Image (tube, grey):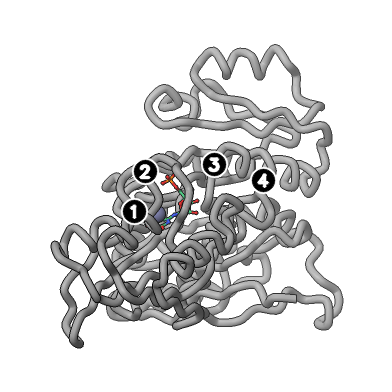
Amino acid sequence: MRLALGLAEQGRGSVEPNPMVGCVIVRDNQVIGQGYHQRFGGPHAEVHALRDAGDARGATAYVTLEPCCHHGKTPPCSDALISAGVRRVVVAMADPFEQVDGGGLAQLNRAGIETRVGVLEHEARELNAAYLKRLQTGRPFTIAKWAMTVDGRIATSTGQSQWISSEASRADVHALRGRVDAIAVGMGTVIADDPMLTARPPGVRTATRVVFCAHRLPTARSRLIQSASEVPVLLIVSPEIDASEVAKLEQLGASVYRCTSSNLVHMIHQSLDFLGSQSMTNVMIEGGGELMASFLTADAIDQYEVYVGAKVFGGRGALGPVAGDGFASVADAAALQLVRLQRLGDNDVKLVYRRMQR
Ligand code: AOF
Ligand code: ZN
């Protein structure tokens, strides 16, 4: 199952909004077939693994997710396992997708195949946390990303921020950009940095660049709007923004989602529902501090990916990554759990924290 989980991981960025799934086929303690779901719309993991095995009669299939039993873009994997003559199927977790939801396992049992569920289930849930969140809530999984100094600053007291983290860290950020569905920023960041928000080099997926426009719009000359015909730009606009100005940017290639409130927290809730409805699974929040604070207030940050660069800026006026009013009481603070700790280059560290499940 551990091998199957590692195979599944190779589909990250290419399979969403589908789950990542891996499958290993074993007979007489020998691995005879391996496969994973490689890209959205393509064959499922079981099909690749059965093909790899050739003859799987009497074998055990280890699958990281319950085999499907529905006719989707491909025929049911339950049928494929049954007709291949597999004797036993071991599954990490049931698939909550409403067209499967236990039906795959039930069908295997009816065909006389022995099944077992729950092997490395925690790891499998972790692997597909974003898929599971979207099924449960209709919203994408959100990743807040920032780079800060050892003393928690994202810029010097005069506003300089290039560069806090090393080249290795920046390459890692671009890899993340290349596998998410959207990269969100606030207008403060657009004005201050005129960012491109593209993955360089390009990844397996091209993220839509999302700008929260509560009070202002990007200018037609901004690099985001200038490149809107090549890489998608979505403006999340509040009702207080002039409709004719919005229309001009639409003509330049930007898409628009209109919120019914100009309160940033409400805009975040509305837009996450919208992004989920557009099949987006992973959304990265790149700042700035006010947008980050509003996401925090909205309790809408699932994961934090924090790069610590080996520098100290100091300074009373040097900003941290999350602005807003903050929590007055320690008891109210966002409680997190550490999921990964990674060294990048010689001196940087990447911290991955997950919101504590309540
Ligand atoms: C499996 N093995 O490798 C995957 C499964 O649109 P489709 O036809 O590709 O079906 C997508 C659904 O199938 C998805 O929501 C999930 O329930 C299941 N994915 N199932 O047996 C796989 N990727
Ligand atoms: Zn399937």
What amino acid is at disc 2? Answer: Thr
Q: Which of the numbered marks, if any, corresponds to residue 272?
A: 4
Expressed as whole percent of the image width and height from the top left, the position of residue 296 reads: 72, 61
Is the distance from the Cβ of mark 1 to the nearest ligand 1 atom less than 8 Å? yes
Expressed as whole percent of the image width and height from the top left, the position of residue 60 reads: 29, 77
Contact, mark 2 vs mark 1 (Cβ under 8 Å): yes
Spatial separation of the CA atoms under disc 4 and disc 2: 29 Å
Is the distance from the Cβ of mark 2 to the nearest ligand 1 atom less than 8 Å? yes
Spatial separation of the CA atoms under disc 1 and disc 4: 28 Å
As helix, strand or loop, the secondary structure at mark 2 comes to: loop
Q: Mark 1 points at which residue?
A: 44
- Pair 3/1: label in front: 1
As helix, strand or loop, the secondary structure at mark 4 comes to: helix
Q: Which residue is drawn at 38% across and 76% down?
A: 348
Q: Is residue 310 visible?
A: no
Contact, mark 4 vs mark 2 (Cβ under 8 Å): no
- Pair 4/2: label in front: 2
Expressed as whole percent of the image width and height from the top left, the position of residue 135 reads: 61, 54
Front residue of 10 and 348: 10
Front residue of 217 and 298: 298
Which callout, 4 or 2, points at the residue further toward the start of the chain? 2
Q: Mark 2 points at which residue?
A: 74
As helix, strand or loop, the secondary structure at mark 3 comes to: loop
Neighbor class of circle 4 (other Cα within 10 Å; few <14, some 14-19, many 20+) is many
Spatial separation of the CA atoms under disc 3 and disc 4: 11 Å
What amino acid is at disc 4? Answer: Leu
Q: Which residue is drawn at 70% across and 12% down?
A: 244
Which callout, 3 or 4, points at the residue further toward the start of the chain? 4
